[in-house]
Amino acid sequence: MDENLYPIDLLDVLLDKDNHDPIVLMDENGRQLSFEQVAMIVREVDGEKRLFPILKPIDRIKGIDDDAAIVFRVEENEEGVHVLLIEENEEIAVAVFDEFLELLKEEKEKRGKN
């Protein structure tokens, strides 16, 4: 079977805890950009559970600090393929990032107790 005919689904990559390979995305100019996945947050929006990956750019991106992380959302396109889009709703992005920071805080507290 030709693996190129059946590409790996984006969700399989994002949800695989053993995958540490960079996530490679294309910008609007067709330039490939590499990201490190730092978290996956599940959050309910408008009564529906949604996935919000938080990715840190590996490549330098103009206008984004080196230590910045970006909140994306997983969507399904017209062909039924999962794609990543930057979460543009600031309220949702801030809430997702705050949840991520809270998880980091809890993890740090857990480690301190062990």
Image (cartoon, helix red, strand yellow):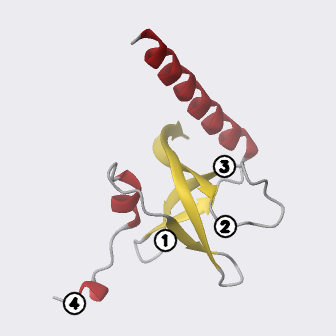
| Residue type (three-letter) at the residue carrying disc 2 | Asp
Mark nearer the N terminus (3 vs 4): 4
Mark nearer the N terminus (2 vs 3): 2
Count neighbours of disc 4 (C-alpha within 10 A) and say few if under 14, some if 14 to 19, many if 20 or more: few
Q: Which residue is mark 4?
A: 2
Say which of marks 3 and 1 sits in front: 3
Position of 79 with respect to 69 (left or right) is left
Mark nearer the N terminus (3 vs 1): 3
Mark nearer the N terminus (1 vs 4): 4
The percent position of residue 5, horizontal first and vertical second, equals 28, 87
Circle number at residue 77 = 1
The percent position of residue 103, horizontal first and vertical second, equals 52, 27
Q: Secondary structure at mark 3?
A: loop
Say which of marks 2 and 4 sits in front: 2
Q: CA distance from mark 1 to mark 2?
A: 26 Å
Q: Is residue 5 above or below residue 25?
A: below
Q: Residue furthest top?
A: 113
Q: CA distance from mark 3 to mark 1?
A: 24 Å
